Image (cartoon, helix red, strand yellow):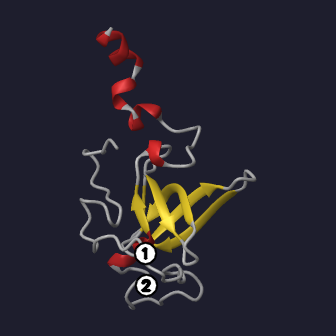
Amino acid sequence: MPSNASSSRSMPGSPASSAPPHAFGDSRTPGPVPGSPGGPGPGSPGGPGSPEAAVTHAPYRREPYVRCRTPSSSIIDGKAAAWTRTSVLLHWIDDAGRAHNRWVPAGAVHRIARDDSTWQDPYDDWSFYYPDSSPARLAAAA
């Protein structure tokens, strides 16, 4: 999958991340989102103002594709709309066409190539995911 080397943003589990290596079989269930009702309070690890609570968002229509293993061992392919050091906001469309957004533990998620995903967003920025297939490059190669 092409990387966006010019970006300083990295997803937990990606090579540029300082997060622990991916634990794809992790069976933890998603906990409260830091700063949400029932989540950690100010001053506690993961609470508002802590480094763990800093949310990173991918550029619009350039979100990385990810695969998530749920506690019930189901697999969901989708996009990482946002992430912290400990959680990923997973976005996907189910078979009935309904959109879902859910915070999941970062350890249950790993990056995949767009072509490896069982679902592809039809509104993706194609030049980001397939930089060698831009019309100008195809014309120059012909």
Q: Residue at x 30, y 60 (%)?
A: 14
Q: Which mark is residue 25?
A: 1
Q: Residue at x 50, y 43 (%)?
A: 61
> Would you name the residue on which mark 2 appears?
47
Residue 65: percent from left, percent from top? 46, 52
The mark total stands at 2
Residue 112: percent from left, percent from top? 41, 52
Farthest residue toward the top?
A: 142
Q: Say what amino acid the circle numbered 2 marks.
A: Gly
Q: Which mark is residue 41?
A: none
Q: Quadrant of the N terminus?
A: top left
Label 2 crowd bin: few (<14), some (14–19), many (20+), radius 10 Å: some
Label 1 crowd bin: few (<14), some (14–19), many (20+), radius 10 Å: some
> Which secondary structure lies at badge 2?
loop
Mark 2 touches mark 1? (CB < 8 Å): no
Which badge, 2 or 1, comes first in the chain's sequence?
Answer: 1
Left or right: where does residue 100 sit relative to residue 71? right
Left or right: where does residue 25 sit relative to residue 102? left
Instruction: Using the rendered view, name the quadrant where residue 22 is placed.
Output: bottom left
Residue 140: percent from left, percent from top? 30, 11
**Residue 62 visible at all:** no
Farthest residue toward the right?
A: 96
Q: Residue at x 56, y 81 (%)?
A: 36
Instruction: Using the rendered view, name the quadrant where residue 37 is placed.
Output: bottom right
Residue 79: percent from left, percent from top? 50, 54
**Residue 100 visible at all:** yes
Residue 125, placed above or below residue 69: above
Left or right: where does residue 121 sit relative to residue 54? right
Residue 32, placed above or below residue 5: below
Q: Say what amino acid the circle numbered 1 marks.
A: Gly
Q: What's the CA distance linking mark 2 and mark 1?
A: 26 Å
